[in-house]
Amino acid sequence: MTSSLPLGDEALEGLIAGELDRIEARLAHEARSTHPIIADASGHLMSAGGKRLRPVLVMLTSQLGSGIDEAVRQAAVATELTHLATLYHDDVMDSAPLRRGAPSAHEVWGNSVAILVGDLLFARASQLVSELGPVAVRIQADAFERLVLGQLHETLGPGAGDDPIAHYLRVLADKTGSLISASAHYGALFAGADEAIIAAVVAYGEKVGVAFQLADDVIDLISDAEVTGKTPGTDLREGVATMPVLLLRAQAARGEIDAAGTDILTALEGDLSDDASLAAALDALRAHPILDESRELARQWAADAVAELAPLPEGPAKDALTSFAGLLVDRLA
């Protein structure tokens, strides 16, 4: 677990680190089952670790009100369970062999078990949220709807006449921004923050989620499996166009693409099932200026997220949320 988050305040960092230990224990409890295979499969991604960004954000936004209490902790656990459930489903849909440096659940137990374990974690997250009241249930339901719609829209692709980049940003907002926004909402809500502050952190969470995923699009291309815990170029191999590829295609549509970019697009339209072909495409993308444009886009979304914090009072919580947004894109250095 992350035990020392650079959030600009030592006391706040220590508080969050201690609370994360409690949340880890609760996550392990929620993965329990008397059936050994179900227990192993449901705890598979939890034991592989993770950033726990969503629980951290729940606890950070609670600092804008009365702070962390049992409702805040329960909401933090529920958001992480929901996130973990989506990963089981995503890996099946993407045929991803690795997640967090370990074999994906479907590689170990098969697609059916992986999908059902994801469903089980969704159910347990819903049980926790149901105990927090109808407003919490609505926040969860809205986020869940957007998670599903985001995946559907990604699967179906942009319609005729749709801007592919705008479509992709909408997918990111739904698939990633929705749950991060819900996390920010929960913390401020259960800490009794003012409505204006709640609205600000909800908007912040949405944009910071998009920034995080845009940064991941670049990291997926520039890092290796030992760093990310995922196989580089999985999206390329599956024919999923992330932001660097979409930006190249936009250049081509405007007639502004260079020869290297044209060669990359040609390679991506070919067969990437061979490891050597995929490696060559990755190397070409890593060397192309389009990655700098993608990095800048991620940083701009993070800056826009921070701008949403303007209504918040000055203090450690606002500073920490500013730092949190920066952490998501500083990984691109």
Image (spheres, helix red, strand yellow):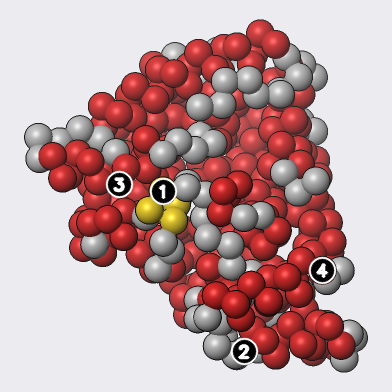
Question: Disc 1 or disc 2, which is closer to the eye?
Answer: 1
Pointer 1 or 4: first along the chain: 1
Disc 2 or 3, which lies upstream in sequence?
3
Q: Nearer the viewer, residue 15 or 288?
A: 288
Residue 41 can be seen, yes or no = yes
Residue under label 4, please give it: 287
Of labels 4 and 2, the one closer to you: 4
* Mark nearer the N terminus (1 vs 2): 1
Q: Would you place residue 254 above or below residue 150 in this image? A: below
- 306 sits left or right of 168 in the view: right
Q: Amino acid at mark 1?
A: Ala
Q: Is residue 126 visible?
A: no
Evaluate if marks 3 and 1 touch, with contact meaning CB atoms under 8 Å apart. no
Taking the image as shown, residue 103 lies to the left or right of residue 187, namely: left
**Residue 230 on image: x %, y %:** 52, 55
Q: Residue 102 has which mark?
A: 1
Residue 269, numbered circle = 2
- Mark before the other along the chain sequence, 3 or 4: 3
Question: What residue is shown at x 69% (from left), y 33% (from top)?
Answer: 324
Looking at the image, is mark 3 or mark 1 earlier in the sequence?
1
As drawn, 197 above or below 22: below
